[in-house]
Amino acid sequence: MNNIISEVSEIQVSYKPNKMVSSKITTSFDAVQIIRKFWNEDTIEMQEEVKVILLNNSNFVLGIYNLSKGGITSSLVDVRLVLSVALKCLAPGIILIHNHPSGNLKPSSTDLNIVKKLNESCKLMDITLFDSIIITKESYMSFAHDGLL
């Protein structure tokens, strides 16, 4: 019995917030202005990436999480990973952002399905998915603004 117990991993949780300089998000435009500072504009038309903005109760940015980098036409969004990061950061709100290297701002059926699944999952955890945003080099579209969230 002691051998079994000694082979179990010990889980340690830590949280060290590093406050961002008064970055409050009240609109999708605010979110895009902030996220562009963390995006490599030289690869925005080459490779799809997904990032998550983590927000506190007052919609101030707790941090940016680089969720995934994919290929030319897609990138992985693991809802469990998004939620685990939000929970670890004690973030009651999140914004999901990804780019479309093609420059097309229209959400794909995959985009719509992921956002629906993430929104339902967030509700179970009392986390608000404030928006999902698609960005391109020149512009962006907001699911919340377009009534898709």
Image: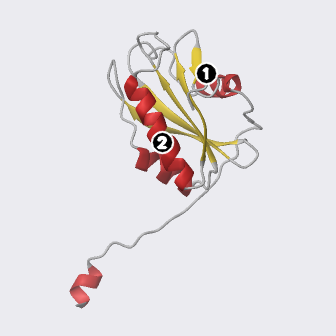
Q: Establish if 31 lies above or below 61.
A: above
Nearest to the observer: residue 37 or residue 91: 91
Asked if residue 98 lies left or right of residue 3, the reply is right
Label 2: few (<14), some or many (≥20) within 10 Å? many
Badge 2 marks a residue whose secondary structure is helix
Asked if residue 122 lies left or right of residue 77, the reply is right
- Residue 15 pos. (x, y %): 58, 59
Q: Residue at x 43, y 12 (%)?
A: 45
Q: Residue at x 62, y 51 (%)?
A: 91
Badge 1 marks a residue whose secondary structure is loop
Q: Which residue is mark 2?
A: 118
Q: Amino acid at mark 1?
A: Asp
Q: Establish if 133 lies above or below 56.
A: above
Q: Which residue is mark 1?
A: 146
Q: Residue at x 23, y 83 (%)?
A: 4
Q: Amino acid at mark 2?
A: Leu
